[in-house]
Amino acid sequence: MACKMKILISIIDNIYSFLEFIFRWWPGTIGVRCRLLYYKNKLAACGDDVRLYPGCYLKGYKNIYLGENISFLINGQIIASETGEEKVVIGNCVGINSNVMINAGIGGEIIIGNNVLIGPNVVLRASNHEYSDPNVPIMQQGHKPGKIVLEDDVWLGANVVVLPDVRIGKGSVVAAGAVVTKNVESFSVVGGVPAKLISKRTAK
């Protein structure tokens, strides 16, 4: 009897996973609207004009906070935690392009302000693997948690990577392909690997 119950539970889980897969990839306006209705009841907070396009994957609903007027294009990921402290907070009027990963990692936190633009293939990862002991495999050394903050009016170009414990100041621009390892002052333009100051934005 117990074996039959396990099989039944497994079948139900597989059916649920299949339906969720279809739901994630449901195309067109109807798919976008249905995903909004679904996630409004799942997430810690979700504004009225959140557009999640096909393939978007959200994990850790209880620690994901979405503001108003957010566009999240195909194949995006937002990863927080259902039980831990990993949290993702996204403000208002945020445009997120395709294939973007916003991952609070293990013990991490990501805060994104208002009027932020994030280009395609960007990675925000708020924790790193520990690797200090050469005698222990890296995968067995755990993680070092951190925090990433994008202040208001930030633009990250395509293929940017932002590492833990980085704050990118208001009005800053990060050039395509940059790897940001340190804080960026407000109204800066940075680029390169690792990212360095290129210029400052000044009013004309």
Image (cartoon, grey):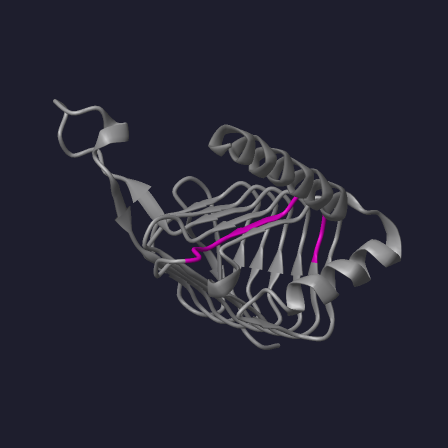
Which residue is found at the position 46% from the left and 42% from the top?
A: 192
Please tell me which residue is depicted at 44% across the width and 57% down the height of the picture.
82
Q: Which stretch did the figure color magenta?
A: 72-82
Residue 74, position as x, y percentages in the image? 72, 46
Q: Which of the image's four quarters has the C terminus? A: bottom right
Q: Decide if residue 31 is on the left or right side of residue 155.
A: right
- From the top left corner, tell me how far across and down residue 124 is, in percent: 47, 50
Q: Is residue 19 above or below residue 201?
A: above
Q: Provide the major secondary structure of the magenta segment.
A: loop
Q: Tag count in the figure? A: 0
Q: Is residue 74 magenta?
A: yes
Residue 117, located in which quarter of the rendered image? bottom right
Looking at the image, which residue is at 57% across and 30% down? 7
Q: Hey, which residue is sitting farthest front in the picture?
A: 1
User: Where is residue 99, by image quadrant?
Assistant: top right
Q: Is residue 122 above or below residue 166?
A: above
Q: Is residue 94 visible?
A: no
Q: In the rendering, at what x and y percent does residue 34 appear?
A: 79, 60
Pick whichever, 85 or 201, lies toward us.
85
Q: Percent position (x, y) of residue 9?
A: 57, 38
Question: Compared to 51, does 15 lie above or below?
Answer: above
Q: Is residue 124 visible?
A: yes
- Give the side of residue 185 with respect to residue 55, left or right: left
Say which quarter of the image contains residue 95. bottom right
Residue 153: say if magenta: no
Looking at this view, is 26 or 19 the one in front? 19
Residue located 81% across and 47% down the image: 26
